[in-house]
Amino acid sequence: MSEETQKPKKEQKPKKEKKPMGFWKTTLASMLGVVFAFLIFNIIAFIIMIGLVAAVSSMTKDTTVVGNNLFLKMDMTNSIAEHANDDELTSLFTDNETMGMDDILAAIENAKTDTKISGIYLYFGSGSGADWAQSEEIRNALIDFKEESGKPVVAYADTYVQSAIYLASVADRISLHPAGMVDWRGIGATVMFYKDLLDKLDVKIELIRPQNNAYKSAGETYTMNHMSESNREQIRAYIVSVWNHVVEQMSETRGIPADSLNAYADNLSAVLADDAQARRLVDNLEFENGIKTFIKEKYDSKRMVTVSKYAKSIKAKESKDRIAVIYAEGNVVSGESNGIQQAVFGDDIAKALDKAAADKHVKAIVLRVNSPGGAVTASEIMTDAVMRAKKEKPLIVSMSGLAASAGYEISCNADCIVAQPTTITGSIGVFATIPEVSGLLSNKLGITTDTVATNRNSNGMTGIRPLSDDARALLQKNVEDFYKTFIGRVATGRNLKVESVDSIARGRVWTGADAIKIGLVDTLGGLYTAVSIAAEKAGISDYSVKNYSVEKKWYDKILNSDKTEEAKIRARVSAIIPNYEEMYYWATMEPMQARLPYSIVIK
């Protein structure tokens, strides 16, 4: 074909070049990408967490205890709470197992008549998670177990701390590691003081308490470097009361004269393994394998079941009539629980009390208290709720190891108060602490401050300058007024004269054994004693016991998992720095407190 006949090619239009995205469009696209990726990541993480919950739930779903000739193993090295939350996430959020006192008592009670259970094995390792009052309650339950079932109780430890040997003293066979010890030396109380440290830091603490509250010693740890005479007097009184009770009970179960037990403590003559056996604090020196072999040969028992698993296997009794149990354990704080921290949250306890009072199936309420006290505002909220609930149905308080200060205020209006002889209670009083850090800022850190104010006292309570006279007078009036309110509540609840309450209050601490003599406690016993009294007052004989404490859902715990890690870190720091947890609490607590010193250790 000739060139003339060829069709001319169409002229192609040049392609338009794409313009680059502008800065803001690029930035916006990047931000949206990051947000989208963050959402996808969290959705995937949430799905994985749900899967973990489902997996744990499936693993723990079957709670049937299979087999015969089983021994119930109580591992007393575990932490002990009044009520251990047993949902599926517990194992994901905790480093170690926690046993609930309610589970321990239920397991012992059920094991009496369970033909699958041949006996109970107490394992203490090198310590015990139970305080004196908890040891007392478990000890009494074991005595009843032996008497009513005829089944044996055996115990083993590498080292027996004093509360452990006290608990183990009811066992039919007490074994100790051949190189172990029995820490039998009497009770000593140690209070740590921080004043000299604060002086070095140029930090001052204003301690404000009612004029006659000399026994209200909690704040003295920051304003003194030694015990006041009042504090020394009350500490001596309650540790002597606890020790005398322990010696009396040990003497009864081990058949050792009280004078001999005291002499062993004075001379440290029953501490080493051979001496402990010679003086009959223990029966056998052997390794744990030895006592396990003994259990197999003597009782033909080859398997053990833990308290936690056994308690879950117990079918709860279902009845139309119920007794509600509400657990108040830890420092008294304001607000609601995040599902992680162990504390007595004022709003949660009030909500639980109102719920139980309004439930037509609940015929009586038991409030189980184990608290050194805490925030005054939270204490008042709970006390008001107790008085409301009491108008609707019988309300009984069961005191565990501690029910002091705010812990006593929320208890004092109950229809009946039950405590252990070794319970620490009372401490009816109040104090306020105000830190002043101007010296720390200027002398240590080189920071100066200047202020502008509209009124004379605008900067009178800032913490970065000394309290003004007006502010100090206001705080003094505040604590004096609350103390009057506190003793007034006790007088009303305990049917005593205000003057009589004032004479035994003033911040003084008492044991349950002494508190019953002065009218602060009605009877001695444990949780089951309180439940029986509640049933009697309600006029019911066929009933079930139900936990009415407010507990957070699993998804709340997931959302607050960062707080779990924080608590774990604090626990690890506490293992290195003595009383770190207490210092952390003091750094975050409300100014006015009705609280017992937490640094006293009498285990």
Image (cartoon, rainbow, N blue to C red):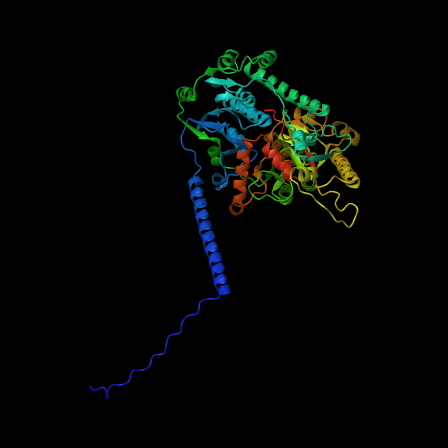
State the residue in front, 200 or 599: 200
State the residue in front, 290 or 308: 290
Residue 358 spot, x, y in % from top left: 64, 45
Quadrant, the C terminus: top right
Placement of 504 over or under 93, stated as above or below: above
Which residue of the protein is positioned furthest toward the left in this rendering? 1
Residue 505 spot, x, y in % from top left: 74, 29
In the visual, does 171 lie left or right of 485?
left
Residue 88 spot, x, y in % from top left: 48, 42
Q: Residue at x 40, y 30 (%)?
A: 67
Could you tell me if residue 536 is visible in this image? no
Q: How many marks?
A: 0
Residue 243 spot, x, y in % from top left: 62, 20
State the residue in front, 278 or 494: 278
State the residue in front, 380 or 338: 338
Quadrant, the N terminus: bottom left
In the visual, does 496 lie left or right of 407?
right
Could you tell me if residue 471 is visible in this image? yes
In the visual, does 7 lie left or right of 80?
left
Q: Residue at x 56, y 37 (%)?
A: 544
Q: Which image quarter: residue 6?
A: bottom left
Placement of 553 over or under 152, stated as above or below: below
